[in-house]
Image (cartoon, grey):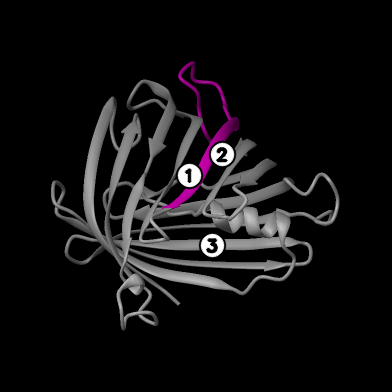
Amino acid sequence: MKKYIFALFVVLASSVATTAMAQNVQLHYDHGRGVATSTVEMFRPDSGGSTFFFVDLDYSPKVSGAYWEISREFNFWQESSLNWLSAHVEYNGGMNTAAGSFNNAILCGLTYSGHSKDWSKTWSLSAMYKAIPGTVGLDGKKQDHNFQITGVWNLDFFDHWISFNGFADFWREARIWQGTQYIFIAEPQLWVNLNKLDGWEKVNLSVGSEVELSYNFAGKGFQVYPTVALKYVF
């Protein structure tokens, strides 16, 4: 499944206590697999950190899969010299018609966040313990305890005409049916922001593309899935 997270969300939460709630809806179409995916995201910062969640639905053409993640960044020290560091907790899970329910996962760890002086470039890096209850390793023994490393970025260019953002995940999760236990996925996105057009300032619509790069995720080995996409920010 896909997820769409912007580094700006994490950075704002760890550096600014009063920021307006942000949310968006995306629609992606994967030509190669003939699958459409809708994504709804919400981000809300507060004086103690921030809350973020997204929900994905896959259509082929009926709804064939659902996935969601919800996370909380704790940062009660936003006025200190350590405001770049947050405590992170997260849950994710889902299901689809082919594979049934996905393994539930609970994550906790630390997030480092940074940004350029004008906030046009933001990034974060999280190192987390990942509990996946009921997982069995390749040796047949329980392997509930795992890890995940996540990097996220958002880069704006040409006076915010172009946005390049995305994430990369690397984690351990044994998959006996594949004979693998390490998974990598990255989903870089490139957007053209139409609200930069004259007369379109209040139309927060973007057009663009995403490329899913994965290893041992949708199947064993390396795979590439490009999409065409629309995004509307509320």
Q: Which residue is mark 1?
A: 103
Residue 47 visible within the image: yes
- State which tag comes first along the sequence, 3 or 2: 3
Residue 125 position, x and y percent, is 60, 39
Give the residue displayed 39% in from the left and 39% down from the top.
Answer: 186
SS at circle 1: loop
Q: Which residue is mark 2?
A: 132
Give the residue displayed 42% in from the left and 30% down from the top.
Answer: 183
- State which tag comes first along the sequence, 1 or 3: 3
- Cβ atoms under marks 1 and 2 closer than 8 Å: yes
SS at circle 3: strand
Residue 108 visible within the image: no
Q: Which residue is mark 3?
A: 53
Residue 26 position, x and y percent, is 34, 65
In the image, what residue type sits under mark 3? Phe
Label 1 – label 3 distance at C-alpha: 18 Å
Query: Where are the magenta residues, as a range?
Result: 135-156
SS at circle 2: loop
Where on the picture, by quarter, is residue 176? Answer: top left
Q: Residues within 10 Å of mark 1 (few under 14, many from 20)?
A: some
Task: Please give the label number shown on residue 60.
Answer: none
